[in-house]
Each structure stands twice: as C-alpha cells, then as structure tokens.
Image (spheres, grey):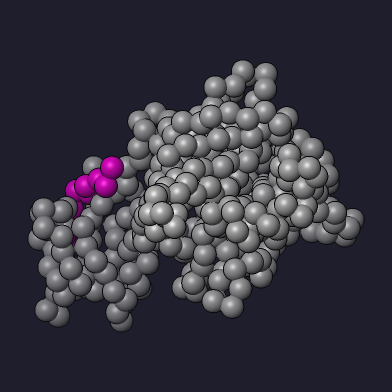
Amino acid sequence: MTRTTQAVALLASAALGAGVAAAAVVLTDGGAGPASTTTVLGAASPADATSGRSIADIYRSSVDGIVEIKVSSTGAQSTSPFGQPQAQVAQGTGFEIDAKGDIVTNAHVVSGAQSISVQTHDGKTYRATLVGSDATTDVAVIHIDASAGDLHPLAFGDSTALEVGDPVVAIGDPFGLADSVSAGIVSALGRTITSPDNRPIEDAIQTDAAINHGNSGGALLNDQGEVIGITSQIYADGSTSGNVGIGFAVPSATVERIAGELIANGHASHPFLGVSLADTDGGARITQVRSGSAAASAGLRTGDVITAVDDQAVSAAGDVVERILALSAGDSVTLTVQRNGALITVHATLGSTG
C-alpha cells in the first residue's frame, strides 16, 4: 500500500495562555469555558449520503462519551522573569471506553503531565490518573473515578474493514471548542506516520475530515458510530499549522489492543528485532545491529539485505517493520537474507521493547 513520508504535526494544543487561549476567550461566554459547537453539514455530505445513520444521529449517540483533557506540566524552558518554573497547560481530547472510568487519548497529549483533569460532556470535572502510555503507538489510557451511570463508553469498530471512500465522523475539542464534529471520508489507508518516539505507526488512516490542534485523542467514527481510529496528526509543510484536509488517525485495531495492554499491565510491549534498516534494491539493508538483541543472537550482520520475512517478499525497510510489528515478543521469525551474493535463511526469536 502507498505510504506517506511527508512531515506531520502532532495535534495537541500548544500551551494555553497565548494564541490558543486568546482565540478561545473570544468564543466563550463569561469565561466558563468554550461553548459546545457543532459543525453543520449539508444533507449531501458523505456520511449522510451513504449511511443509514446521519451525522446528527452519530453525534447524538457518541458525544456523551467524548471528554476534554487538560494537562498541566512544567516545561524546561518555561520560566518566569524571576527564574521560577511556570506551569504549562495543554489541551486535548479523549473518549470513554468502559464503565469503570477508563479513557483513551494520545500519548503525546499526556506526555510530561504533572496533573491531568477531565471534563465530561455533562460539565463535570475530574482529576485523572495515568494508567499507562505507549509512545510507540501514541496511545495512552487515563482513569477517572466516576459512577458507571455518568459514563458513556464508545464501542470500537473494525478498522481493518475500512475502504477508501468510506464516510467518517470526527468528534473532539479543536482549540478548546468542546464537542465539535466534522465529517469526511477515508482518503487513504495503509499510511505510515511517525510516533512521538520516532518509530513508525503502521496502517494509519488518512482522512479529509477537519481536525485541528486539540483534536488529539478524539474519536474517528465510522458510519455506524463505532470508533475506528484516534485522531493524532495533521499534515504540516511549515506554512500552516491548521487543517489542510489531510489528517491521520491511529487505527482502532492498534488502539484497542494497546489500550487493553495498558489497562492490564500499565505498559505495552512490542516485538523487537534490533536492527536499523535502509531501503535498497530488492529489500532492506541492515545498517546497524544492536548488541544483545534478537538480531545479534541470530547472527545478522551489518550489510545483510533482508529480502523476505516468513517467506513473504519485502521490497523496502517499511515492509520489514510492518511484518515484525504484526508479530509478538517471543515469536520466532524466519528471515531470508542476501549476504555476499548468496541467499541464506536466518531464524530469530523476537525480543520486547516493553
């Protein structure tokens, strides 16, 4: 599948207090917080035209499960004129996933958090605790102590069943404008985006639904109101930091799995081979083998070219990464390797990053 190599930008709002706060103040009444807004779309919009459920219906059934997240942290470069650290407040979105108070958001939304607060759709505010965060997939789970009757968990859908052109609906808090909805289509599938720890996130969903700073961690829903992704990044070319009709979501197949691991263990694990790769003709060239890794134990060497993973041919480094990430730590993997003009078979037992 086609993959994007263009620059993207994480969607969490910058520290509130300057431009973002000023914009929000104009749109609030009396300083009580941003008013809820709904993007009004015509009847001919994609989700209305192809689904048995209208955008309004999806919004009504889902919005109660969307939350606004505010994170307080002290930045290393954030100091007062007197040299004292100053608190920074960033804003993002999340959505409830069970009746216990667990909420999914992006890892970059809660990164470095000293305190996390959550405002639910009914206007109640809770202090949240971090259950776990996984920078490799940009998924985090936080928890609030709320009664089951006050929670409205959203259901996950099957992101692997999506097709290009399918209608989608995004709900979130762009620029602090709580509970905003926008709609569009799946523009592309199989994109690769970069995680906060500079690793590839495979199978990202590209959409033209309007998403902006503050939408991070929000739900991307299919035409049945099921979560099929978590809005995470937007295209950025240096000339703009707002929506240009190219946004990316981490697929629900990844989000649901990682969230389950975070809730169960407090952390997520990922299969680890232990090589650095570069594209080359006919495969992926190993440019570095990490000492003590699965690759080192298996005898892989710098300069080897991986041409197949478990007998499936690969044509680029991204193919190898995708195949490895589809496995689990502890799994055995068979690599076909070209070395000094000869093809050899190497067996490795994958390690874990978690």
The structure residue drawn at horizontal position 54% and vertical position 49%, both measured from the top left corner, is: 90
Side (left or right) of 328 relative to 137: left
Who's the residue at 49% across and 74% down the image? Answer: 6
168 to the left or right of 273 = right
Q: Is residue 349 left or right of 1 when viewed as pictured?
A: left
Residue 49 spot, x, y in % from top left: 84, 56
Relative to 273, residue 105 above or below: above
Query: Looking at the picture, how far across and down is residue 56, in whole percent?
Result: 83, 44
x, y percent for residue 93: 60, 45
- Tell me if residue 15 comes above or below residue 110 in the rendering: below
Out of 26 and 221, give the one closest to the viewer: 26
Is residue 34 among the parts visible in the rendering? yes
Quarter of the image where the C terminus is located: top left
At 54% from the left edge and 54% from the top edge, which residue is drawn? 15
Q: Residue furthest front?
A: 82
Q: Position of residue 16 (x, y in %)?
A: 58, 52
- Nearest the viewer among 249 and 27 is 27
Q: Which residues are magenta?
A: 344-354
Is residue 106 visible in the rendered image? The answer is: no
Q: Is residue 118 magenta?
A: no
Q: Is residue 353 magenta?
A: yes
- Name the residue: 58% across, 47% down: 92
Q: Of helix, strand and loop, which mostly describes the magenta segment?
A: strand
